[in-house]
Amino acid sequence: MRSFVEVLRDNAVYTEHAHTFVRLDGSERRISYPDLWRFACQRAHRFHELGLRKGDRVALIVPEPDAFVLAFMGALTGGLVPVPMYPPLTLAKMDAYGETVRHILRASGAKALVTTPGLEPMLKQHLVLAAGCNDVKLILDAELEGEPELRPVPPCDVALDDLAFFQFTSGSTTMPKGVMVTHANLAHNAHAIMFDGLRATSRDRGVSWLPLYHDMGLIGFVVAPIFAQVEVMFLPTMNFIRRPSSWLDAIHRYRGTITFAPNFAYALATRAVSEEQSRAWDLSCLKAMGCGAEPIHADTLRRFTERFARSGLCAAALLPCYGLAEATLAVTFARLDVPMRVECIDPRAMERGHAAPQREGEGLELVGCGRPFGGHELAIRGQDGTALGERAIGEIWARGPSITRGYFEQPDATRESFVGGWLRTGDLGYLADGELFVCGRAKDLIIVHGKNYYPQDVERVASEVQGIRPDQCVAFARVGADGSEECVVVAEAQKASGKALREIASGVKQRVRGELGLTVAEVVLIKRNTLPKTSSGKVRRRDTRARLERGELELLTERPLAQSVPAARASNPAQV
Amino acid sequence: MTDKHDLLPMFKTVAARVDKRSFDDVTRASVITDLGVDSLSMMQIVGEMETELSIQIPDEDLVEIVTVGDLCSRVERRLV
């Protein structure tokens, strides 16, 4: 099996092939396959000239897709270990961002940080003052540029066994974890995705606006397509967020055959694309519309395919999949050309840990995510690790060549999740005829807009708000009215007037937004000493959520009607 | 045209649509980062205003925006 660097080198013979990059200002840049390789070698040499060596970590905060991809490919070609990081969002709070940057730089032991002149002053301000980050060398992406090498030879060899890059999971703000992905992991997962999953040929074309610092955008579109000589059009993420039509418009213009997005993006496109914008589109070219990275809702995907059916979109192109950064990217794919499989499950049986199918229209809808890739294996296990049978709900474990080496310099966290060759995913699910259905998380993560938040972080911040009884609050996720996940906080409040209670609630929202960048959809204030707890005094998140849904909490204020979600769509009983 | 475009009502309508709650209390002096809207939703709001008015606000212009009034006047400037 060839490494990414070897494939990039060998692909230089495909002179007709190119990637297309849409830049932030809307202009387009085409970079041919031969140039990708020549630029990668040129940048690899620049990194070495700047004093970096094989194995050194280099953080990347580069918003332009073309500059990012060339820097990333250059780092891999030079044997460096890139650490992709997200650029600051416009109109966001910079303090919280600076803190994340410092945490990741420290946790990765990065020697250098590549960025742009526009971001340099802000980053300097957050780094110079921070202990442990002063010796990180700032490199401007322009310093990496140069004429592509005429006789490209990389500065060092890269073996399959070598570390390729670190994927930081957007986890707890206090403990970011860097997943160590090897070149062998990349090669295996890329083969599985492109050939097993997508049956891709060099005539396929990818279209992606996914962030390049995140596994789905980075491995799914920067790494994997190179293995199958698939050309890709990259769009800046913010272009999609501001103009959701730009995604499908690009697929129409470029004749894209492969695209991927999380659930929320399908909901956004359905809502925000106008008739006028979509009138001329022909989306019949699409053969694979992947959906992953956050819980998948059948309703959201159905509404999307119904909305765009008149543009020629084929419903069978929808491709639910399952994966996680600890397994490089993907573990299962639904079958290509087959309509998505949806099961209706009895919520009561689910509470008892069994997924009993019901008639259509009854119970909770779950989407099938397909079978594991060849050479990979799945198991459903109980809390004690014993294997469970068909349709039993338990933790999803995964094994195979895509499972990464664990978390960088975090032996405890690694031992917890990587057990005897298996990866404990922390997700709950069941197998039916070999197909995986994901029905929740064993860990109480909250995933909003594709980003992970730990309830403990939200609770810590909410507890600091005046009027909230310290540590007497819980945070959890539920499915919102539009089918995407949202965060709810339930907290015990000091006795106060209605007006004061409203101020406490808005204080919680502001504080969480300010410190974590997360929007809390609803703050529910309840009477003191009524928060569900375990006998040892620990808060019970799932129990609290279930009681809120059943109307069993002792509220201090009335809840607005719009906030109560219909029972059938409410969150997942498996987690209760 | 003598009467200046007032974008505040439009901001409230679009924000309410994107974030699914009322923004009635918002004034031009409200600080954007205190509205409890995450940055992705904020960019959706900006994008929907741009689409409805068929304008485009350059990214550089967004960097210095602090209050809702700042945003409104950036948009108003594009409409003149």
Image (cartoon, coloured by chain):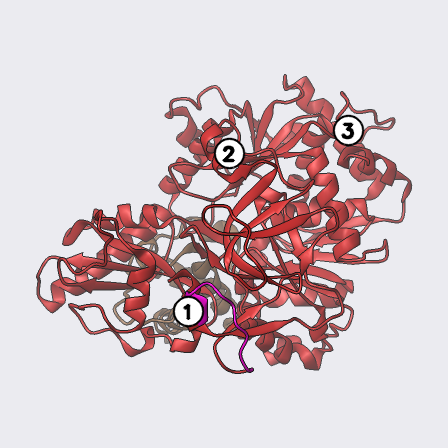
**SS for tag 3?**
helix
Q: Is residue A262 or residue A514 the one in the foreground?
A: A262
Query: In this figure, which residue is indicated by the disc labeled 1?
Result: A480
Instruction: Give the residue type that dot 3 points to.
Output: Cys
Q: Position of residue A524 (x, y in %)?
A: 24, 64
Residue B54 visible from this viewpoint: no
* Closer to viewer: mark 1 or mark 3: 1
Give the residue drawn at x 66%, y 36%. A72
Can you identify the residue that label 3 sits on? A41
Mark 1: few, some, or many residues within 10 Å (few <14, many ≥20)? some
- Above or below, A123 against A531 in this view is above
- Precedes in sequence: disc 2 or disc 3: 3
The amino acid beneath tag 2 is Thr
Label 1 and label 3 in one chain: yes
Q: Chain of mark 2?
A: A
Q: Which chain is brown?
A: B
Secondary structure, mark 1, is: loop
Q: State the quadrant of the N terminus of chain A.
A: top right
Q: Colour of chain A?
A: red
- The answer for how far apart the CA atoms under marks 1 and 3 are is 47 Å
Q: Which residue is mark 2?
A: A414
Rendered residue at 89%/49% (across/down):
A16
Q: How many marks?
A: 3
Q: Which residues are magenta?
A: A349-359
The residue carrying pointer 3 sits among few (fewer than 14), some (14 to 19) or many (20 or more) residues within 10 Å by Cα, namely many
